[in-house]
Amino acid sequence: MKKTLTVLLALAMFVGAAGLASAQAKKISIWCWDPNFNGYSMKEAAAVYNKAHPEVTIEIVDIPQGIEGKIEAGLMAGGAGLPDIALFQDFQIEKFITNYPGIFADLKAAGVDYSQFAGYKVGIMSEGKKVYGIPFDTGSTGLYLRSDFLKDAGLNPDSYRKNLTWNEVITLGKTVKAKTGKALIAYDNTDYQFLRMIIQSAGGQFFKPDGSLDLNTAATKAGLKVLKDMNDAGILYMSEGWNNWVSAFNNGDAAGMVSAVWLIGTIKSQPANAGKWMVVPTPSLVGVAGAQNASNWGGSSWYVFEKSKNKAIAIDFMKSVWASKDPAALGFYNTILKGAGAMGTYLPSRVGSNYTSKDEFFYKSQTVYADFSKWMEKVPALRYTANFNAMGTALTASIQKYLKGDLKTPEAVIADATEGYKQVSGN
């Protein structure tokens, strides 16, 4: 009897331990930032998944600052304390793929169909035949214009609702400035993103495939010339920093700006401007082969860690909601577009009513989300590398010298930025 009791107790302990392990395996943790955008979107995704899998607990942890540093610390500690899934900014991911080989699960091998995502998002998360991430939001860009200022200049706004070149924009800006005194484009003098968007639209790169800096390209030279021509024509409204830049266009100091779809919430914060704004495709560079009327600013994607104890569930969650044509999954994308202004890059999702509906805030009730999602398909891929931030720092400083007149030519800017990059990066 004593032996039988011992066996039963051992069996009970084994079953209990197995049950505990099973319960632990049915919980996944996710790290991200911005609870009103990324966190909100992931909570909506979790709600969809839990309808079919109520036994899985999905914990979403807000990391308000320094998520990349916290992840790097975990990686240096052999993966200790890391979540199952984490959000990475797109421009950061190549650094992690290069510096920490094998840390992410290959989701292409797990069956994700990447032909269904915007192509420019997939390239940066790829390594050979492996693809690691699930693309999230787009930073598809356009030229925002105030239709009322165009009218004040004696122009018909409808004449500009089309693909434009930067040369045509300069001509437009000169007319608006002469007739209204308004600069056409709000420009942040502390950032190089405006030029970067121009260069990316032409398929230009800042780095060679081997990761070495290469600013001496046709796209960079043409973009610099356009920037200087706009500055010399007086059609850039100079501002310093993000807040001043936002004030410049929200307060009507400038008649427009170039930015991404995620700026819509910011301009809607000024109800008095309802019906005045319109957005047209990002202007293209003349004389550069492959130049498009599309570019990108920002965006992030989700990654599953290879050593996650709950990798199978994490992958199933991401595939079932973020990479699925199931009606509930497509409805999820439609929900987060309205709830947070989060436009996903899963192409089949664009059939949702929030994508296709007219927006009364915009001039002639433009179907603004449908337009941005259409332009998204044409965005050229950009190579970031681990030194993208160092390049941006150097290029920003050289652009400031250029617009002040201290550097006279695009070639001089390229030489100056290349030298500055060496000092910042050590390469």
Image (cartoon, helix red, strand yellow):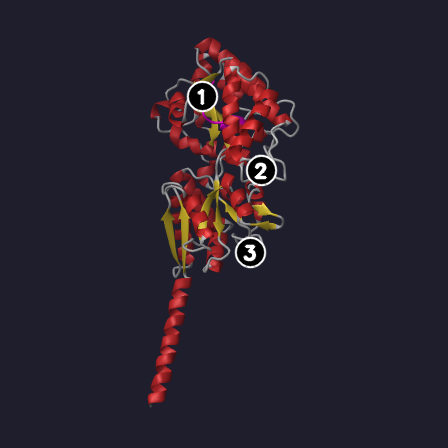
Nearer the observer: mark 2 or 1; the answer is 2
- Left or right, 12 with reference to 409: left
State which quarter of the image contains the C terminus. Answer: top right
Query: Badge 3: how crowded within 10 Å, few (<14), some, or many (20+)?
Result: some
Residue at the bottom extreme of this rendering: 1
Placement of 339 over or under 224, stated as above or below: below
The kind of residue on which mark 1 rests is: Ala
Start-end of magenta stretch: 184-195
The residue that appears at 52% across and 22% down in the rendered structure is: 399
Q: Report the number of discs.
A: 3
Placement of 150 over or under 92, stated as above or below: above
- Mark 2 or 1 closer to N-term? 1
**Disc 3 to disc 2, how far (Cα)?**
25 Å
The kind of residue on which mark 3 rests is: Ala
User: What's the mark number on residue 186?
Assistant: 1
Magenta stretch encompasses residue 176: no
The residue that appears at 51% across and 31% down in the rendered structure is: 392
The residue that appears at 54% across and 47% down in the rendered structure is: 99
Q: Helix, strand or loop at disc 3?
A: loop
User: What's the mark number on residue 110?
Assistant: 3
Whole-percent x and y of residue 172? Answer: 52, 15
Residue at the top extreme of this rendering: 178
Query: Badge 2: how crowded within 10 Å, few (<14), some, or many (20+)?
Result: many
Q: Helix, strand or loop at disc 2?
A: loop
- Mark 3 or 2 closer to N-term? 3
State which quarter of the image contains the N terminus. Answer: bottom left
Placement of 101 over or under 347, stated as above or below: below
The residue that appears at 53% across and 20% down in the rendered structure is: 160
Question: Residue at label 2?
Answer: 383
- In terms of image quadrants, where is residue 68? top left
